[in-house]
Structure formats: structure tokens, C-alpha cells
Image (spheres, rainbow, N blue to C red):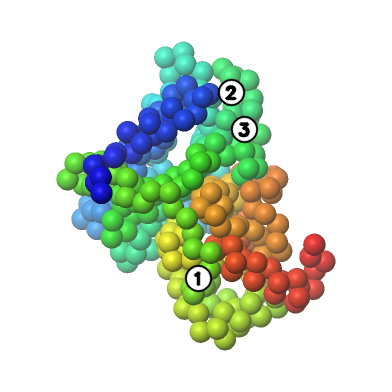
């Protein structure tokens, strides 16, 4: 068994050769995101020691209380992307509007990046895993000009690349450029993300379901009936409360992750642009399915707002097919 270390940089460059049109900008961008992830990882791992825990008192666009680590991660990602010269615009959960980045050394960047810098921030103070989620699009507006909001409001099917970093017992970066999904584990002793999960394929089925059971009474009938079915089948309920972590487990162990609509979040809580689309891209690339709770494919939704929320159900293909039958059977809406 050849157990030679393959670093993220080496893998990205090697894969670049697979893309005839690739001219290195995307490669550079992915590497810059890897650098930002290492910087954020360092602070996440010592957050309790360096007084960046706790809240900074502000609230983000989504009304979530912002913890200092959120802001730190946001700033580091922006700095890395700003210096890369490959990114001309950013849309972040932490910023109400998109950010237009100036050209670096007269290079006119081709890509925009959407990200949630620190997903699951409510878990930071209790040492539960958190994550970074990112998606990369080709800009639609003219190169060399200011980015427009339409550069960000693209369907998930237009993603050039997407991925996430999970800061847990180990720090793993998982990404796809549309040709499968690969995972890289950070080796702190050499400061490199090393290939650890090649060609990830989600199990066709699974015995876990992941949903906030506390909202059960607020879910629509069809979702309650489906959750009842999972319980009747003695499936395990696993819910960490960090989207990245719950989906990372689903990617490896199979099953389904759901965030349906509730009274508090009538359109769902999770954001389409920088949470649902990148995670749906990864899950589909791994052979899974990702849809809204009224059965629309996540990646085909037309975004209308940088921070719009959607419902989501994603995971193993056979489990999603099963969920679809319950929605069709019990939904009061006209489901097609
Ligand atoms: P609830 C974390 O705050 C987050 O945005 C996602 O990471 C997670 O899946 C969800 O919200 C948890 O929300 O309402 O179950 O606490």
C-alpha cells in the first residue's frame, strides 16, 4: 500500500492538470482557502486560552449573536482571499453586503467566494466541533469591473468548487471541484493538510437521522410522519447542532440531515448561498441527494438574496427517496 503523504497543495496542482481549461487561478484560490483554514484552526484550538471566546456584543445579519471567533475567522478568510489576487468579491454570513476586492498587481480576478466563516459558533464555548463552509463561482460581470450582486446570486449548479473545514478532534478539509470529493486531515506537526479520505462516496442508506427533535411539534405533518417512521425503524437520532459536523457524519455514516421550516423560521433557518448550496454540492458529488423539504433540488434554486434561508434535507440517496414518499403522501401542499 503506497502510504506516501499527498498534501492538499500537491493534490490540487495534480488535479489542475486534469482540467484542460484550468489556468492556475482556481488552484491558487483553493490553496489560499487552505491557508486561511490553518490560521482559523490555530485560533479555534486555543480559543479558550486567548480570550477570544465570549461575545463581542454585536449581531450578524441573521440576528445570531456574534462571538469573537466568528469575527476573527471572517477577517482571516477575507485577508487571505484579498491577498490571493484570484478573488474579486466575497459574500460572507458575517457581512450584510458583499465585499468587492481590488485587483492585486493589475490581475483581474475571475472568481467570487461565498462563505460561512465559522458555522456552529453557538458551540464554540462548549468545545463542540465547528466549521467553515465555502463555495467558489466564476464571476458573471465583466473582468476588471466592480463585482455585482448577480455574481453571487448564482444557482448551486454553477459552483466551480465547494467545500468545508471541520474543526473537531482533528481538522479536516473536504472539497470538490465537480469531479468527486476528497478529504484532507491537518497534520499539525508539518502544518499541512494531507490526503486522508480519497474519493468519498456517501453510503446508499443509513441508520441515523439528524434533526432538532425539540422542534418536532412545530414541523409540518409530513416531516413529523417521516420522523415517526425513522423512530419506528429504531434509527439513531444524532444532532450536534453544527451543520458541518452533522453533515460530515452523514457523509461517512449515511442517513439524513434535515432542517425543516418551523414557526420561528418559516422558510427554514439555514442560508442557501453559503451553507446549503456548498454542502449540497459536496453531498451530490459524493452520490447523495439534497433537496428542500418540499422536494426542490437545492442546487437548482434561483437565489434572490445573499442571506436567504431555505429548508433542507440531504444525505443517502435511498433515504432521501424514502423521505420523498412521506412528503408526497402527507403534504397538504401540491407536491410535484
Ligand atoms: P438549531 C448553527 O447555529 C447553525 O447555523 C447550523 O450550523 C446548525 O445546523 C443550526 O444552526 C442549528 O440550529 O435551531 O437546531 O440550534
Ranked by sequence position, the earlier of labels 3 and 1 is 3
Q: Dot 3, how many residues are within 10 Å of its Cα: few (below 14), some (14-19), or many (20+)? A: many
* Residue farthest along the front direction in this orientation: 1
* Residue farthest along the left direction in this orientation: 189
Query: Which dot, 3 or 1, sits closer to the camera?
Result: 1
Residue at x 47% of width, y 16% of height:
107
Percent x, y of residue 156: 61, 44
Q: CA distance from mark 3 to mark 1?
A: 37 Å
Ranked by sequence position, the earlier of labels 1 and 2 is 2
Label drawn at residue 22: none
Q: CA distance from mark 2 to mark 3?
A: 10 Å
Let me know if residue 130 appears in the view: yes
- The one nearer the camera, 277 or 94, is 277
Label drawn at residue 146: 2
Residue at x 60% of width, y 58% of height:
289
- Left or right, 210 with respect to 123, comes to right
Query: Which dot, 1 or 2, sits closer to the camera?
Result: 1
Q: CA distance from mark 1 to mark 2?
A: 46 Å
Percent x, y of residue 293: 67, 64
Percent x, y of residue 70: 40, 50
Asked whether the residues under the numbered discs 1 and 2 touch, taking CB atoms below 8 Å apart as contact, a structural biologist would say no
Q: Dot 1, how many residues are within 10 Å of its Cα: few (below 14), some (14-19), or many (20+)? A: many
Location of residue 188 with respect to 80 vertically, above or below: below
- Left or right, 320 with respect to 165, comes to right
- Report helix, strand or loop for mark 2: loop
Label drawn at residue 206: 1
The residue wearing badge 3 is 151
Amino acid at each position: 500500500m503506497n502510504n506516501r503523504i499527498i498534501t492538499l497543495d500537491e493534490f490540487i496542482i495534480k488535479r489542475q492538470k486534469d482540467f484542460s481549461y484550468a489556468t492556475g487561478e482556481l488552484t491558487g484560490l483553493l490553496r489560499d482557502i487552505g491557508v486561511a483554514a490553518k490560521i482559523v484552526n490555530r485560533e479555534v484550538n486555543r480559543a479558550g486560552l486567548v480570550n477570544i471566546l465570549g461575545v463581542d456584543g454585536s449581531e450578524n445579519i441573521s440576528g445570531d449573536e456574534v462571538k469573537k471567533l466568528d469575527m476573527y475567522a471572517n477577517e482571516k478568510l477575507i485577508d487571505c482571499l484579498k491577498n490571493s489576487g484570484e478573488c474579486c468579491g466575497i459574500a460572507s454570513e458575517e457581512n450584510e453586503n458583499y465585499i468587492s476586492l481590488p485587483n492585486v498587481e493589475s490581475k483581474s480576478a475571475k472568481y467570487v467566494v461565498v462563505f460561512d466563516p465559522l458555522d456552529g459558533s453557538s458551540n464554540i464555548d462548549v468545545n463542540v466541533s465547528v466549521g467553515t463552509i465555502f463555495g467558489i463561482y466564476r464571476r458573471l460581470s465583466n473582468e476588471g469591473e466592480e463585482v455585482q450582486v448577480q455574481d453571487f446570486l448564482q444557482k448551486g449548479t454553477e459552483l466551480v468548487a465547494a467545500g468545508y473545514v471541520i474543526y473537531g478532534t482533528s481538522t479536516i478539509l473536504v472539497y470538490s471541484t465537480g469531479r468527486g470529493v476528497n478529504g484532507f486531515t491537518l497534520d499539525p506537526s508539518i502544518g499541512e493538510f494531507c490526503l486522508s479520505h480519497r474519493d468519498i462516496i456517501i453510503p446508499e442508506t443509513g441508520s441515523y437521522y439528524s434533526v432538532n427533535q425539540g422542534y418536532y411539534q412545530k414541523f409540518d405533518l409530513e416531516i413529523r410522519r417521516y420522523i415517526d417512521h425513522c423512530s419506528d425503524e429504531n434509527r439513531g437520532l444524532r444532532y450536534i447542532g453544527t451543520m458541518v459536523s452533522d453533515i460530515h457524519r452523514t457523509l461517512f455514516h449515511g442517513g439524513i440531515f434535515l432542517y425543516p421550516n418551523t414557526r420561528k423560521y418559516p422558510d427554514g433557518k439555514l442560508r442557501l448561498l453559503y451553507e446549503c448550496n456548498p454542502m449540497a454540492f459536496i453531498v451530490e458529488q459524493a452520490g447523495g441527494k439534497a433537496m428542500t423539504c418540499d422536494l426542490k433540488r437545492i442546487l437548482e434554486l434561483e437565489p434572490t438574496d445573499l442571506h436567504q434561508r431555505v429548508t433542507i434535507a440531504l444525505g443517502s440517496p435511498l433515504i432521501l427517496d424514502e423521505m420523498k414518499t412521506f412528503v408526497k403522501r402527507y403534504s397538504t401542499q401540491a407536491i410535484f
